[in-house]
Image (cartoon, grey):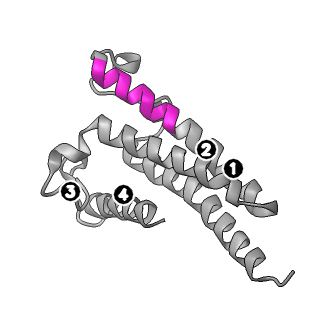
Amino acid sequence: MVVVIAHWAEHLAQAYQIYVLGWPVHHALGVLGMPFPWLVHSEWLHYGYALVMLAGLVLLRPGMTGRARTWWTVALWIQVWHHFEHLLLLLQALTGHHLAGRPVPTSLVQLLVPRVELHLFYNAVVFVPMVVAVVLRRRSALVPA
């Protein structure tokens, strides 16, 4: 969860830089991107994070039971899609062939929603069911048998 929250902080910082400070999107690099701008532009980094998240959701799933497992599974399937989108972005970056003739790697949903907003959305729709699952799991662990 620490890694997930740190990732959230990066996206929220980037959104703050764009919508509150009025920075252009290409200058809004989040917290780590300010000293290390190549991080924000590395599809390998984004793909790696999506893969680690997917692996974590798969590995921790057996520990979830009942309703917690249902919520965790929802987060897992959304992350499967998010991982697919990052794989598509990575393949475009590696090959130089971009979706719909765009000048930069573009995911499927990004054809409709800008990347900054899309990643805030993806973070939310994976994070919320994860939190619900963790809360439900903790509650079930506190209930005496």
Magenta region's main secondary structure?
Answer: helix
Q: Which mark is residue 23?
A: 3
Q: Which mark is residue 78?
A: 2
Question: Which mark is in front, 3 or 4?
Answer: 4
Disc 2/disc 1 C-alpha distance (Å) = 6 Å
Three-letter code for the amino acid on which mark 3 is drawn: Trp
Mark 3 and mark 4 in contact? Answer it, CB < 8 Å.
no
The crowd level at tag 3 (other Cα within 10 Å; few <14, some 14-19, many 20+) is some
Q: Which mark is residue 74?
A: 1
Q: Position of residue 131 (x, y in %)?
A: 61, 66
Quarter of the image where one finds residue 31: bottom left
Label 3: element kind: loop
Let me know if residue 92 is in the magenta part. Answer: yes
Let me know if residue 75 is in the magenta part. Answer: no
Q: Position of residue 44 (x, y in %)?
A: 31, 36
The residue at 23%/60% (across/down) is 22
Note whether 4 is above or below 76 in the view shown. Answer: below
